[in-house]
Image (cartoon, rainbow, N blue to C red):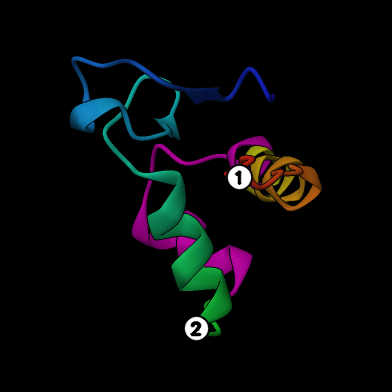
Amino acid sequence: MSPRITIDPAICHGKPTIRGSRLLVTTVLELLAGGATWDELLMDYPNLEVDDIKGCLDYAVQLAHFKSYPLAA
């Protein structure tokens, strides 16, 4: 996982956030999926950096690679 992404049970109920903030990874990903550009995100969130956006995308890639197996009955 990217060092830009942190998970702390005391912040946002343990949901993944951008380091040092309460900006959720899901927020960034949803905005990108909705058509927001990187430049728009960087303007709307002044503390956000390009490497933070890359970290969010990397996090999503890691989740896409996650494999789950059905439990035996």
Residue at disc 1, secondary structure:
helix
For label 2, the residue is: 34
For label 1, the residue is: 56
How far across and how far down the image is residue 26, in percent? 43, 54
Identify which residue is drawn at 76% across, 43% down. Answer: 67
Amino acid of disc 2 = Gly
3D distance between C-alphas at marks 2 and 1: 15 Å
Identify which residue is drawn at 69% across, 44% down. Answer: 68
What are the residue bounds of the magenta stretch?
37-53
Q: Mark 1 and mark 2 in contact (Cβ < 8 Å)?
A: no
Identify which residue is drawn at 44% across, 32% down. Answer: 18
Q: Is residue 66 left or right of residue 46?
A: right
Quarter-of-image position of residue 12: top left
How far across and how far down the image is residue 35, in percent? 55, 84
Among numbered discs 2 and 1, the one appearing first in the sequence: 2
Vertical position of residue 29 compared to residue 2: above or below: below
Q: Residues within 10 Å of mark 1 (few under 14, many from 20)?
A: many
Vertical position of residue 35 compared to residue 57: above or below: below
As for residue 47 lying within the magenta part, the answer is yes
